[in-house]
Amino acid sequence: MFTGGDQNQYCFGEGDPDADLMFVGEAPGKDEDAQGRPFVGRAGQLLTKIIESIGLKREDVFIANILKCRPPANRNPETKEIALCSPYLIKQISLIKPKVICALGKFAAQRLLETETPISKLRGNFYDYHGVKLMPTYHPAYLLRNSIGKKDVWEDMQAIAKELGLKVPQGRSRA
Ligand code: URA
């Protein structure tokens, strides 16, 4: 656990260990810290809808974060914390062997791709992450404040579904 905070639990991730699709967010928030599960707050509820928009259920994918515990007072993760947590994420990816990783938001996308390019420029394209296709898209917490980004996320999810060979049910409503 990081020092100086009010963290309760580690939050390693959850989902299908054989998932073809893995989501990676930034760090657990207050709700996630309380439950020890990733993306269970408001942003998490929206992520569930985003997953369902391509005909999958939450249990079909694996959901993790770069950081495995909540930064004190929700401050931005520090370099030392990223370095401490990264081996866990790398191990998770090597065990799950997803076909596609969806990086949720600027922080996850920039750290995984080791770039400072803005998320608005990164999203919408696949990148190579050690042999795995990686699609950056906007973080669901950002969408809660900026619903204009939902169309882009919907398009990114359609590209992921196509890459995975999923048949998205016609008339699926956007998240
Ligand atoms: N935001 C994240 O990046 N991860 C979570 O688990 C919850 C909110």
Image: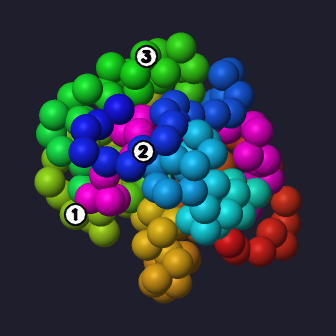
Horizontally, is 171 left or right of 15 in the view? right
On screen, 19 above or below 87? below
- Magenta region: 53-75
Q: Earlier in the sequence, mark 2 or mark 1?
A: 2
- Residue at 43% over, 64% down: 138
- Say which residue label 1 marks: 118
Q: Residues within 10 Å of mark 3 (few under 14, many from 20)?
A: few
Q: Assess disc 2: are there few (<14), some (14-19) or many (≥20) residues with their C-alpha within 10 Å of its C-alpha.
A: some
- Can residue 50 be spotted in the picture? no
| Residue at screen point 25% across, 38% down | 3
Q: Position of residue 55 (x, y in %)?
A: 80, 53
Frontmost residue, 32 versus 88:
32
Residue at disc 3, secondary structure: helix
Seen in the picture, residue 18 relative to 107 is either above or below; the reply is above
Callout 3, which amino acid? Lys
Label drawn at residue 7: 2
Tell me which numbered mark, 1 or 3, is placed earlier along the sequence.
3
Residue 143: image location, x then y, percent = 50, 75
How many residues crowd mark 1 within 10 Å: few (<14), some (14–19), many (20+)?
few
Q: Quadrant of the C terminus?
A: bottom right
